[in-house]
């Protein structure tokens, strides 16, 4: 009762205010009516509502255009019956599309216009039924009308109003593209137009006021960050120079993974180990140190640390949610989402501030040159020349979440396809041997490893709808007009599994990439795991290298056994990301001809 009444009344009030802000002449007329009745003697009271017909017309017109329940609540038939000559069987669900009825141009003049005056003449019949009809009609309609009238009346009577921000006009245009040709159009011809990101509730909380790289508006700050990453930090030159950091991380990881099993078979929570590797690698690059020490990895303290970090950085918060499309839901605290976001924001803030503070102190006390080569070192020196430049960036999150999720998927797939695992191992054995651990310079000689990763990103992408883009101008895509301020979602899940583009699209077949090498079009616009155009992933090369190295080492040095059948499709909830709370477990044993090498790492 509480939910039914609160939600519907609040939605209607919000729509009414939005319509009034769009139609100041209606607002003026409503105020005149209130002023004539009450003057300035007292604020509007409930009994006054009945004496304000124009205010009532405004509420009715709002309920006509934006009914709180556009399909009413479903009804259910208990017997056979007929409607307009059609036989309707027992147990039929009935939906009443009042959105359609109340905007039907055969019934309403200028059906989509906001014209409260139309209700002055009274409305007959069942063309206006925002509260339903018959036995199950809303019993709270009278109370709702009074409540809405009172709040709206007080707003109009007591305050001056002016609209700021975007209009609430009943729709937020969203363009979903699911074909390679449309993707190409969006990110070539229209690339600058779609180079923005929409504002959203998640953005409001988790992007440090939209200064974080992945959410920054297309402008000066984003351009500086892009230049810094693409030309410097993540450039192929710099990646070459820093390859020893990643190689060393893989050595550390493999060594502690070997120690953990003590030379024997052991069950392992791979999710925890993969996250340990990813967090440690990213933190090394960002701040020059590990988060989980080698002794703690896989043990109680390390597991607790990873759990805490996942709770802060790898959280199941969709980048867009219902509240972004129905702002009122935000106001009523829909599903506690905003509360969760504010909590995560505080935790991230605290974590990143500590990281920065610690970094500054260490740098002062040690004067460490190594520290200057880290991401924070570079950002801090940049901040010295450009003080408004922000350092609390979440590049850390962008890289850790996607890399660790992809690494988990690739291991899941290989455990489910042992023939692919053996083929991959044979490639590594033949190119690297068993006298040393593979390193970055080997990667160009391991095409099957690359294909396995591509195939994983094709089937189980960590960001199946990319990140949302937002258009800054009108444009056309596929011959359709796309208005300014449209959210663009790229359904790479559909594109990368499209049977018109991929043979046996749902099968895990890394070999397909070798076969496609000779094709004219190649992978163009079909495999877009790192996005396309200006806002594509600047960490693509580094991310791929890190995954390849860690995966290569796991396959090169250990034998693997799955813990049982697992339904991969079910683990992939194809929402905005995979289920974050499902751990991947397996049994591993050091390969006998690698024990010596592993003991010497
Ligand atoms: C397997 C690993 C990775 C995958 C699959 C991946 C994928 C993506 C995707 C799909 C986007 C969005 C593109 C778009 O909006 O059109 C993106 C953006 C981004 N990625 Fe990655 N990424 C990975 C690793 C990394 C790494 C390691 C870093 C950092 C070192 C990173 C940093 C970023 C940043 C900063 C953006 C935002 C770019 C912008 O808005 O201009 N990513 N990534």
Image (cartoon, rainbow, N blue to C red):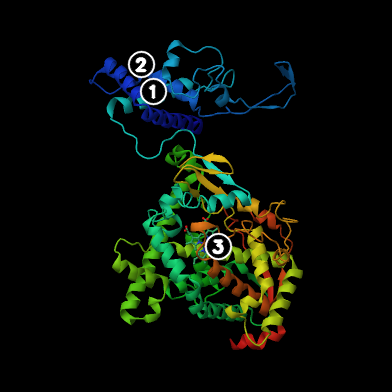
- Above or below residue 69? Residue 484 is below
Would you identify the image quadrant in which residue 380 lies?
Answer: bottom left
Residue designated by label 2: 52
- Above or below residue 142? Residue 584 is below
**In front: label 2 or label 3:** 3
Helix, strand or loop for disc 3: helix
Between 478 and 68, the one lying in front of the other is 478
Cα–Cα span, label 3 and label 1: 50 Å
In this rendering, position of residue 270 left or right of residue 342 = right
- Above or below residue 86? Residue 321 is below
Q: Judge: label 3 CB < 8 Å from ligand 1.
A: yes
* Disc with the residue nearer the chain's start (3 vs 1): 1
Circles 1, 2 touching at the beta carbon (< 8 Å): yes
Q: Residue at point 59% right, 28% down?
A: 73
Q: Quadrant of the C terminus?
A: bottom right
Cα–Cα span, label 1 and label 2: 9 Å
Image spot of residue 291 (x, y percent):
47, 72
Image spot of residue 81 (x, y percent):
73, 18
Residue designated by label 3: 402
Q: Which mark is residue 89?
A: none
* Disc with the residue nearer the chain's start (1 vs 2): 2
Circles 2, 3 touching at the beta carbon (< 8 Å): no
Residue 573 visible (yes or no): no
Helix, strand or loop for disc 2: loop
Residue designated by label 1: 149
């Amino acid at each position: 009762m509480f939910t039914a009444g609160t939600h519907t009344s609040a939605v209607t009030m919000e729509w009414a205010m939005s319509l009034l802000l769009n139609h100041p002449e209606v607002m003026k007329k409503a105020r005149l009516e209130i002023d004539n009745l009450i003057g300035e003697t007292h604020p509007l009271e409930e009994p006054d509502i009945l004496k304000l017909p124009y205010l009532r017309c405004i509420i009715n017109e709002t309920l006509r255009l934006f009914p709180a329940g556009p399909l009413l609540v479903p009804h259910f038939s208990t017997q056979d019956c007929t409607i307009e000559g059609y036989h309707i069987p027992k147990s039929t669900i009935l939906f009443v599309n009042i959105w359609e009825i109340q905007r039907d141009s055969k019934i309403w003049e200028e059906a989509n216009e906001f014209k409260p005056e139309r209700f002055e003449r009274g409305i007959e019949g069942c063309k206006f039924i925002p509260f339903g009809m018959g036995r199950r009609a809303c019993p709270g309609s009278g109370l709702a009308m009074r409540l809405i009238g009172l709040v709206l009346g007080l707003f109009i009577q007591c305050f001056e109003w002016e609209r700021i921000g975007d209009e609430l006009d009943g729709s937020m245009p969203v363009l979903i593209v699911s074909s390679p040709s449309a993707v190409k159009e969006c990110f070539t011809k229209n690339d600058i137009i779609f180079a923005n990101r929409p504002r959203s509730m998640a953005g409001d909380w988790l992007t440090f006021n939209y200064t974080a790289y992945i959410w920054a508006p297309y402008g000066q700050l984003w351009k500086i960050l892009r230049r810094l990453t693409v030309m410097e930090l993540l450039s192929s030159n710099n990646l070459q120079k820093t390859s020893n950091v990643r190689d060393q991380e893989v050595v550390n990881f493999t060594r502690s993974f070997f120690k953990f099993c003590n030379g024997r078979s052991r069950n392992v929570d791979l999710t925890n180990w993969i996250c340990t590797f990813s967090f440690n690698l990213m933190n090394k690059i960002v701040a020059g140190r590990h988060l989980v020490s080698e002794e703690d990895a896989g043990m109680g303290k390390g597991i607790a640390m990873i759990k805490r970090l996942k709770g802060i950085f790898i959280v199941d918060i969709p980048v867009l949610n219902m509240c972004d499309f129905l702002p009122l839901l935000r106001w009523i605290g829909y599903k506690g989402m905003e509360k969760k976001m504010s909590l995560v924001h505080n935790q991230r803030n605290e974590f990143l501030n500590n990281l920065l503070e610690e970094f500054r102190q260490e740098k002062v006390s040690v004067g460490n040159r190594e520290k200057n080569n880290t991401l924070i070192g570079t950002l801090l020196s940049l901040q010295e020349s450009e003080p408004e430049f922000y350092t609390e960036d979440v590049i850390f999150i962008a890289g850790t979440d996607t890399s660790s999720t992809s690494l988990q998927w690739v291991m899941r797939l290989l455990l489910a396809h042992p023939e692919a695992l053996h083929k991959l191992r044979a490639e590594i054995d033949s190119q690297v041997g068993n006298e040393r651990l593979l390193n970055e310079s080997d990667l160009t000689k391991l095409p099957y490893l690359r294909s396995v990763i591509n195939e994983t990103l094709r089937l189980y992408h960590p960001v199946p709808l990319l990140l949302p883009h937002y258009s800054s101008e009108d444009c056309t895509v596929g011959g359709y007009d796309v208005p300014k301020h449209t959210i663009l979602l790229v359904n790479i899940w559909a594109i990368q599994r499209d049977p018109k583009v991929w043979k046996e699209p749902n099968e895990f077949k890394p070999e397909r990439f070798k076969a496609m090498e000779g094709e004219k079009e190649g992978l163009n616009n079909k495999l877009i795991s790192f996005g396309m155009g200006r806002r594509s992933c600047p960490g693509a090369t580094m991310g791929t290298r890190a995954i390849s190295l860690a995966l290569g080492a796991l396959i090169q040095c250990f034998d693997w056994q799955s813990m049982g059948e697992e339904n991969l499709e079910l683990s992939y909830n194809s929402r905005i990301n995979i289920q974050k709370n499902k751990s991947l477990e397996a049994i591993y044993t050091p390969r006998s001809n690698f024990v010596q090498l592993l003991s010497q790492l």
